[in-house]
Structures are given as C-alpha cells and as structure tokens.
Amino acid sequence: MKSEVIDHEDVRTIKLSGKITIGAGDVTMRDLIHAAIDDGKKKILVDLGDVKAVDSSGIGELVAAYTTVAKNGGRLALLHLSPKINDILQVTQLVTVFDVFDDEESALAAFS
C-alpha cells in the first residue's frame, strides 16, 4: 500500500492507495493514524479513493483508527469511498459510525 500525507491547516489528510488487507496495509494505516495523533492532529481525513481492496482486517483497522482518534479527542472522516468499500460499510452498518464525504472541499469544510 502507498500513502501520502497532506496537512490542510489543522486537518491531516491521509491518502491511501492499493490494498488495506492483513499484512498489506493494515499496519501502515495504523502507523499513519498514530503518527497524526503524535503530531497533535485531531482532525483526520482518510482518502480511500485509490484503495482497490479491503478485507476484514482492513475494516477492523478503520474501526480501530476511528476509536484511537476519538479517544484522543479527535475526529476521523472518510473520503472517496469506492462502491465496493461503501457496500462493505453499508452491510456492516459502519456507514452510520463514520462521517463519509464524496469531495474533499465538503470534508474539509465539515471539520471547521
């Protein structure tokens, strides 16, 4: 999995690409979330637009990221869900847990 970190004032965007699966992205995502918290970022936007696959480990890591950020007084939102990832979140009813956005401008505005 590849990643890119972009800071927009007080919002950190973590753009992921590839797979969030056991052994191929789950640990990377966890490390990126912890690094954001360690850097004092409390508003985190995870861009999943280029993520091709997510397995149960990846879903678990998304939930763990949400919990970690919330426990540290922050907020995590998801951006650019593919139809496949959206379906997974719908079936698991996790779509009710996460704030989900289709465009970056709306997502950043929602953090204000």
Image: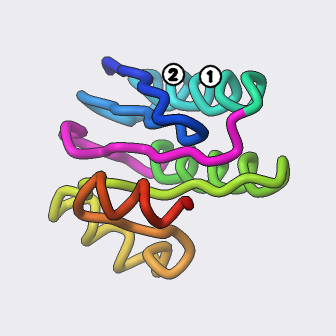
Which type of secondary structure does the marked residue at label 1 adopt?
A: helix
Disc 2 residue type (three-letter):
Thr
Disc 1 residue type (three-letter):
Asp
Where 8 sits versus 87, above or below? above
User: Is residue 56 toward the left or the right of residue 36 in the image?
Assistant: left
Residue at image location 30% in from the left, 45% down from the top: 48
Tell me residue 89's x, y (percent). Answer: 38, 70
Where 89 sits versus 36, above or below? below
Tag 2–tag 1 contact (CB < 8 Å)? yes
User: Looking at the rendering, in which quadrant would you find the N terminus?
Assistant: top left
- Residue ID for mark 2: 28
- Residue ID for mark 1: 31
Residue 65 is one of the magenta-drawn residues = no
What's drawn in magenta, residue-wise?
41-56
Residue at image location 51% in from the left, 68% down from the top: 98
User: Is residue 42 toward the left or the right of residue 89 in the image?
Assistant: right
Classify mark 1: residues with Cα within 10 Å, few (<14), some (14-19) or many (20+): few
